[in-house]
Amino acid sequence: MRPRFAVVVVALVALLTLNATVSLACSCMLSGPACQAFWPTGAVFDGTVVSIEQIPREMEIAGRTMSFHDKLVKLDAHRSWKGVDVGPVEVVTGQGGGDCGFDFVVGERYLVFAHKGPTDGRLHASICTLTQRFAAASDAVTFLDSLSKPSAGGRIFGSVELFSRKLNTAAASNKTPMELTVRLSGGGREYSMTSKNGRYEFRDLPPAQYRIDLSVPDGYSTYSPGRNVEIPDPHACAEESYAVSVNGRIAGQLLLPDGRGADKVHVQALDADVPHEKQYQASTFTIEGGYFEFKDLPPGRYVVGLSLRGGPSEMSPYARTVYPETIALAFGNAVQLEPWRAPQLAQTTLNGTLVWRDGAPAPHVVLDAWDVTDKPDTRFAGQATTDGGGRFSVKLWEGRSYALMVSTPGRRERMETDVTPLSPKVGMAPVRVTILGDRPVR
């Protein structure tokens, strides 16, 4: 069975100053409706929050032990359908935002779906579960109350929609219902139906493992048209929805100047009829040998290139470079490009000293380099922190133009410098950079 609940916390460690700061981003797959979420969930109950307190938590990130805080939520459970007894219950959740924490409020009543933590054995709830204010949970409560009654069987249902992808931001992407054949097999039976107005549903299914298959026409594609689902109980359900897209493809091979394949390079595709800075992009990475492929592209005219949005980076060490031909892509077609050789840029280190207007060195100041070669499309290119004598080193790319700005401890706003956009070169002498701002008062 494909898991329906997952929480992924991505930790990004950025040494923005002399101290390390950590940014967390929440990403999760929602648990589905109550008839689906109930079975893999450890505890389901109705309770009122009595108190909330902070509890410490440690996480290993990039070889370092980082300290965080969670919330310990104490509730008075009025009813329980699974996993706990009526009375005092404790649930752990995050602070909110990046750690997927649910925003419980003291005195409020909630329908709680919680799972048992694999390491601490405590119950945990998050925004990825079906936990919600009790006043808004009437549909879920109706299902929970139905568990004590007979059921004719489970359900498998969902939507089938055509996702129209648009790189031009002036024409927003949209979804359109599709009528496609959906087949279901399992429990010794086979079923088939056509989605109507983008919806399908198989009812009265006995508990069993099932296989669901969507018939996708030529020229279209979808993620995992064949899926395994489980109906563990006559009251259970499974929601499986499909986003179908036109499967236009552009494939090619990127070569280094010496003829070898350029592996793990960021390649981009853009609408040829729209200014680059005013649209989204399709992007992919080359694999071993320099091969790449864009998928799920609608009909249109495309440019394929490197650094089309902004300047070079570690993922794409090239100046803005475009494949020699504009690619005309018809509905659902595949276009194979000729091998393409792109000139690689040299990376160099810009060394220098940062000083205040009176000539005094500016120690422990953060210097940011911004690539302004392709104005107005600018991008962050690199960062360094000056040492005790105001000296800095930052890696940049030869042949590009950069503006330098600084920020100092205790001040959020950036300050400009006297450097007009400069183009670093290999072997360039150290530069002297003056901050066009007042020195902080100590």
Image (cartoon, helix red, strand yellow):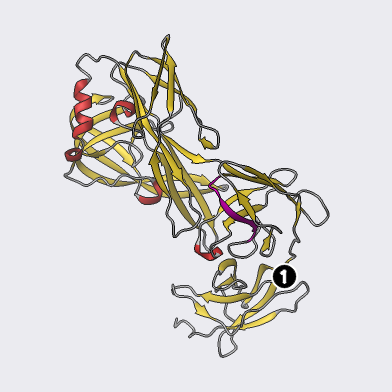
Residue at 37 percent of width and 51 percent of height: 97
Q: Quadrant of the N terminus?
A: top left
Q: Nearer the viewer, residue 267 or 197?
A: 197
Q: Is residue 380 magenta?
A: no
Instruction: Identify which amino acid the numbered label 1 is placed on.
Output: Glu
Q: Nearer the viewer, residue 376 or 356?
A: 376
Relative vertical location of residue 394 with respect to residue 144 in this rendering, above or below: below
The residue carrying mark 1 is: 398
Instruction: Name which quarter of the figure residue 180 lies in.
Output: top left
Q: Is residue 213 left or right of residue 77?
A: right
Relative vertical location of residue 342 with respect to residue 400 in this rendering, above or below: above
User: Which secondary structure, mark 1?
Assistant: loop
Residue at 52 percent of width and 37 percent of height: 220
Q: Is residue 408 left or right of residue 207?
A: right
Relative vertical location of residue 397 with respect to residue 237 in this rendering, above or below: below
The image shows residue 233 at horizontal and vertical percentages of 32, 16
Q: Quadrant of the C terminus?
A: bottom left
The image shows residue 241 at horizontal and vertical percentages of 40, 33
Q: Which residues are magenta?
A: 297-307
Mainly helix, strand or loop, the magenta region? Answer: strand
The image shows residue 418 at horizontal and vertical percentages of 58, 85
Are there few (<14), some (14-19), or many (20+) residues within 10 Å of tag 1?
some
Instruction: Name which quarter of the figure residue 428 lies in.
Output: bottom right
The image shows residue 387 at horizontal and vertical percentages of 61, 73
Residue at 80 percent of width and 49 percent of height: 260
Residue at 66 percent of width and 64 percent of height: 320
Q: Nearer the viewer, residue 133 or 320?
A: 320
Q: Is residue 41 visible?
A: no
